[in-house]
Amino acid sequence: MGILILFAILIPVVGAFLLPVVSLISEKLRNTLAFVFVAASFACSAALLKSAPDDLPDRIESLQREAKGLAREIEALTDREISALVESTLKEHEPAGPARLYVRRYDRFDADGLRKIADGLRGRDASCVAVLATGKGGRVSFVAAAGADAVAAGADAGRLVKAVAEAAGGGGGGRRDMAQAGGRDAALIESALQAGRDAAIKQLTGK
């Protein structure tokens, strides 16, 4: 019985002493492991980049500059491609009352690319009414645009893009001269563009 009493007294005392020690050891172990992990990551990054560890920050900064430069080059190439595309598109249009109608699908561009194309068309052709679509990456987007003369003749890009998007299970709208919307089903893009074509002709001819 005396031994049990002694254990009962000593266990809390020993526990109170050991807990801070174990906690301190655990903290040091965590810090050591963290340091080892960071050092190993640093060494692996240096090896992958074929650079000495001391030169790694400068190497990373250099790669970041190169990446930004490549991004600018890609953007410039895309802008040139869009300019060429606008020029070729302007040669083929459908008559729609007093306006010229451009209905196109460009899956290699995203929504930003469609807006640039639409801006290029209405900037070059004041009688332009454009209904554009993309399904790039599985994301369905529509852009409608109308030049100043087309707007004066009754074109409304906001209503056009709304009709197109609804035909593809989506929605959206915007200004009379420029509007954007999204769809849900890429399989419905072609029928949605046809709905946009019909809506544009009705706006401009009443038929």
Image (cartoon, rainbow, N blue to C red):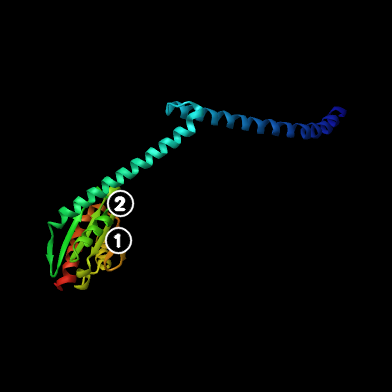
- Picture disc at residue 139: 2
Query: Along the line of sight, which residue is nearer the eye, 156 or 147?
Result: 147
Above or below, 9 relative to 130:
above
Q: Residue at x 19, y 51 (%)?
A: 85
User: What is the x, y in percent for residue 133?
Assistant: 24, 55
Residue at numbered disc 1: 180
Residue 45 in view: yes
Residue density around tag 1, few if under 14, some if 14–19, many if 20 or more, within 10 Å: many
Q: Residues within 10 Å of mark 2 (few under 14, many from 20)?
A: some
Cβ–Cβ below 8 Å for labels 1 and 2? no
**Residue 70, quarter of picture:** top left
Please give the name of the residue rendered at 80% of the width and 35% of the height, measured from the top-left corner.
12
Task: Specify the quadrant that holds the N terminus.
Answer: top right
Is residue 57 toward the left or the right of residue 81 in the image? Answer: right
Residue at disc 2, secondary structure: loop
Q: Nearer the viewer, residue 73 or 91?
A: 73
Quadrant in which residue 9 is drawn: top right
- In three-dimensional space, the C-alpha distance between marks 1 and 2, rounded to whole angstroms, equals 13 Å
| Nearer to me, 149 or 141 | 149
Residue 198 lies left or right of residue 170; in this view the side is: left
Q: Please tell me whether residue 41 is drawn above or below residue 189 in the rendered image.
A: above
Query: Residue 202 at what x, y percent from top left?
Result: 17, 70
Q: Amino acid at mark 2?
A: Arg
Q: Quadrant of the C terminus?
A: bottom left
